[in-house]
Image (cartoon, rainbow, N blue to C red):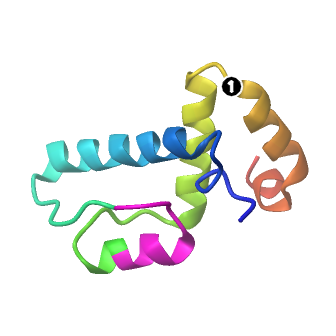
Amino acid sequence: MFTLSASPAFGALATAHLRDVEAVEQGLNGDLDVRHAGPVTKSTLAKLARDGGVNLSWDDYRLGVLGHLEDHGMGGVAELMNCTMTTLMKRS
């Protein structure tokens, strides 16, 4: 479980990002049936979309969490991840 979503240090910030995404979706469409409960994983995001929640890809979620961390003064984490994760390096 080496993910930011499951990390004791970053889990709450990762959840806050998803809550922000859900709030925006609710405000735009007003038809959000389900909200995510618990640590986010690739499979829980897919289930959430199937069940009427936000439709957010795993990659977009991860990039959003890194942006959320940057917005909260933790840009070093995002910079480290962008320099070490090949999937993020390809997107830059």
Stretch in magenta: 37-47
Kind of residue at badge 1: Met
Describe residue 84's horizontal placement relative to residue 33 as left or right. right
- The location of residue 39, given as percent across then percent down, is 49, 60
Residues 29 and 68: in front is 68
Q: Residue at x 10, y 52 (%)?
A: 30
Name above or below for residue 61 compared with residue 78. below
Name above or below for residue 52 compared with residue 40. below
- The location of residue 44, given as percent across then percent down, is 45, 73
Q: Residue at x 65, y 39 (%)?
A: 9
Q: Residue furthest right?
A: 84
Mark 1 neighbour density, 10 Å: few (under 14) some (14–19) many (20 or more): few
- The location of residue 52, given as percent across then percent down, is 22, 72
Dot 1 corresponds to which residue? Answer: 74
Q: Residue furthest left?
A: 30
Q: Please identify the quarter of the rendering in which residue 78 is found.
A: top right
Describe residue 59's horizontal placement relative to residue 12 as left or right. right
Q: Residue at x 56, y 24 (%)?
A: 71
Q: Please identify the quarter of the rendering in which residue 70 is found.
A: top right
Q: Residue at x 25, y 78 (%)?
A: 51
Describe residue 92's horizontal placement relative to residue 28 as left or right. right
Residues 76 and 12: in front is 12
